[in-house]
């Protein structure tokens, strides 16, 4: 030890012992010091012990603590700028060997010898000492400097560890979980405030009166002691639900307990037992609420389902009744329709008798005439007899036709309705009329509205309407010069379609218009006056309306409406 040799002189020895003792005392003095105070203190001590002219101590910011720095100078350097001195000696120290630097100052005699020792915290933490006297740095100086650096390192590390511990303690204490640890025998050492509150302990000290098994609900204690703790000791951990007890209120509180062993990281030997436990009361309440809610929901679903089933039953019954009522209504409608036709037929009976009387009288006359001729024994020519009989045949056929048309009119039959394409239906009817029109021809202009293509109706009946109207028109025009017929369809509104047949024939005189649509009103020699009344009956059955108006340019316009169907 080279420094021991330097201590041959008693004064030097005494001084060294004094300095060593002073340095050993420092850590105790620094117990409550912060880094800056420690740094200040060591700088002052070294300036005096080493008889130095400048001591600079710097500790950078570590783990979020502020940086600490102190520079102490002797009276010899009092006039020099501290900043310049700092720069000079730190620059020298960074060279990592002892240096001699010159500091511009009015005071110090001669150059400054600078030496530095690291503080074992980081590369930037160091103590730099400069002195102008020739003995600096001696071995004893280096020894004292080394001890000072060690003291500073330990003191700063202790300060940091304490700060760190405080932070962790605050963190644990603020936690809402019950955190605590105990000895391996179960004597509590620490319980955080959440834990104390849950257990009903007034302060940390009161926990010391119990052991951890007292914290369990009475019925759980035995299990905790015999079963759970051995598990913790053996496996290192037990996690599960268990009931604890509040000392103040006596309340039994369900907890999720994480109970574990803490081993010494250096040797692996078990040191403590600890717990992080969660109060399950809220969760249990929520679970119970949820269960209740689920049950009531299920009950309500069952109730609602049965209500719906009842409603469905009622609806089914109603639907059956309605469909029964509907079919009854349909039957009644048909009966009514039939009855109204019958009553119309009743009204017609008189006119019919008159109508039939005419051809039948003609037949009787013709047949009598023929018989007379034949009785006269051949005076008459045979072909005259044939003419007379032909006339009788014609009148008989006419009577038959009157009866057939009347039977059609009054015959009852369900009108089968289908979705029909109106333009197709009209074109077909028009084709039939044109074919029957012969060589004279008939010019029919068809004009269809694209928005009026689909109707719900009976095709045969609707075609019968078209045939009657077009034949009437054709017959009215046969007497005039023009032979043109316009048939158009149009969408009136959302619900109805209109079909119009417009001719440029002779038109209708007032007296005919008065009885229009009534049966057996005709102005034609071979007409039966049934066409328009049949038309109106059919249109009525289809829920439409039949109308007549004169054509302004001469002629007649017959139109009827039908309920519209959407193309879909
Ligand atoms: N387009 C028309 N132009 C002029 N007169 C018409 C027209 N349509 C009908 N009429 C008049 O109305 C009368 C009644 O017509 P309706 O079709 O009911 O019977 P009809 O044509 O006389 O005989 P049928 O029973 O053979 O049809 C006709 O006789 C005719 O005088
Ligand atoms: Mg007619």
Image: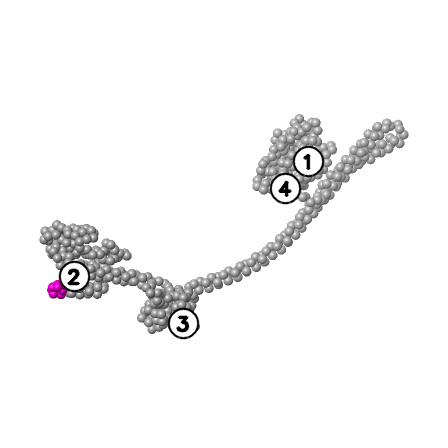
Q: Position of residue 209 (x, y in %)?
A: 33, 73
> Which residue corresponds to the image point at 19% horizontal and 51% vertical from the top-left?
91
Observer-side mark, 2 or 1, equals 2
Residue matched to label 2: 3
| Marks 2 and 1 in Cβ contact (< 8 Å) | no
Foreground: 231 or 17?
17
> Which residue corresponds to the image point at 16% horizontal and 61% vertical from the top-left?
3
| Marks 3 and 2 in Cβ contact (< 8 Å) | no
Foreground: 56 or 556?
56
Q: Which mark is residue 225?
A: 3
CA gap, disc 4 and disc 1: 22 Å
> Which residue corresponds to the image point at 52% horizontal and 60% vertical from the top-left?
298
Range covered by the magenta-colored residues: 2-14
Element at label 3 = helix
CA gap, disc 4 and disc 3: 88 Å
Does residue 50 appear left or right of residue 440 in this picture?
Answer: left
| Marks 3 and 1 in Cβ contact (< 8 Å) | no
Observer-side mark, 4 or 3, equals 3
Q: Position of residue 179 (x, y in %)?
A: 36, 65
Residue matched to label 1: 468
Vertical arrangement, residue 86 with respect to residue 566, above or below = below
Quadrant where ligand 1 appears: top right
Q: Identify the mark nearer the N-term, 2 or 1.
A: 2
| Marks 4 and 2 in Cβ contact (< 8 Å) | no
Observer-side mark, 4 or 1, equals 4
Residue matched to label 4: 419
- The verdict on residue 426 being magenta is no
Does residue 217 appear left or right of residue 523 in this picture?
Answer: left
């Amino acid at each position: 030890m080279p420094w021991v040799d330097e201590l041959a002189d008693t004064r030097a020895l005494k001084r060294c012992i004094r300095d060593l003792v002073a340095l050993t005392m420092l850590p105790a003095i620094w117990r409550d010091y912060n880094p800056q105070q420690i740094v200040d203190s060591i700088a002052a001590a070294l300036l005096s012990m080493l008889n130095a002219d400048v001591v600079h101590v710097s500790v950078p910011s570590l783990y979020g603590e502020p940086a600490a720095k102190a520079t102490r100078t002797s009276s010899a350097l009092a006039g020099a700028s501290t900043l310049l001195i700092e720069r000079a000696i730190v620059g020298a120290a960074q060279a990592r060997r002892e240096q001699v630097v010159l500091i511009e100052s009015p005071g110090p005699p001669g150059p400054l010898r600078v030496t530095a020792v690291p503080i074992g915290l980081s590369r930037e933490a160091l103590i730099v000492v400069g002195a102008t006297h020739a003995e600096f740095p001696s071995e004893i100086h280096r020894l004292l400097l080394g001890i000072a650096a060690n003291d500073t390192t330990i003191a700063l590390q202790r300060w940091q560890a304490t700060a760190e511990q405080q932070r962790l303690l605050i963190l644990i204490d603020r936690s809402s979980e019950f955190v605590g640890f105990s000895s391996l025998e179960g004597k509590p050492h620490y319980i955080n405030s959440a834990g104390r509150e849950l257990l009903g302990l007034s302060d940390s000290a009161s926990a010391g009166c119990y052991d951890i098994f007292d914290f369990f609900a009475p019925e759980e204690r035995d299990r905790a002691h015999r079963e759970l703790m051995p598990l913790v000791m053996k496996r290192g951990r037990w996690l599960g639900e268990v009931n604890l007890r509040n000392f103040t209120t006596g309340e039994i509180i369900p907890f999720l307990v994480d109970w574990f062993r803490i081993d010494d990281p250096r040797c692996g030997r078990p040191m403590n037992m600890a717990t992080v436990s969660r109060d399950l009361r809220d969760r249990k309440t929520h679970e119970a609420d949820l269960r209740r809610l689920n049950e009531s929901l299920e009950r309500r679903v069952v109730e609602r389902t049965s209500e719906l089933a009842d409603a469905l039953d009622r609806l089914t019954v109603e639907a059956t009744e309605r469909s029964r009522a509907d079919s009854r209504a349909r039957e009644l409608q048909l009966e009514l329709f039939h009855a109204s036709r019958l009553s119309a037929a009743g009204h017609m009976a008189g006119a019919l008798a008159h109508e039939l009387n005419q051809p039948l009288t003609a037949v009787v006359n013709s047949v009598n005439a023929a018989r007379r001729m034949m009785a006269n024994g051949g005076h008459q020519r045979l072909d005259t007899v044939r003419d007379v009989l032909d006339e009788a045949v014609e009148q008989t056929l006419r009577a038959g036709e009157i009866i057939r048309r009347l039977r059609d009119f009054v015959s009852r039959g369900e009108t089968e309705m289908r979705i029909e394409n109106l333009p197709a239906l009209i074109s077909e009817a028009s084709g039939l009329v044109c074919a029957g029109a012969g060589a004279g021809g008939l010019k029919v202009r068809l004009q269809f509205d694209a928005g009026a293509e689909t109707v719900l109706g009976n095709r045969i009946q609707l075609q019968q309407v078209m045939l009657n109207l077009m034949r009437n028109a054709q017959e009215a025009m046969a007497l005039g010069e023009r032979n043109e017929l316009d048939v158009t369809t149009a969408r009136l509104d959302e619900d109805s379609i209109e079909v119009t047949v417009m001719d440029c024939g002779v038109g209708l005189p007032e007296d005919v218009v008065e009885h229009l649509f009534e049966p057996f009103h005709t102005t034609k020699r071979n007409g039966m006056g049934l066409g328009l009344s049949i038309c109106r009956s059919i249109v009525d059955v289809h829920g439409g309306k039949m109308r007549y108006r004169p054509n302004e340019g001469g002629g007649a316009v017959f139109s009827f409406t039908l309920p519209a169907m959407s193309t879909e």
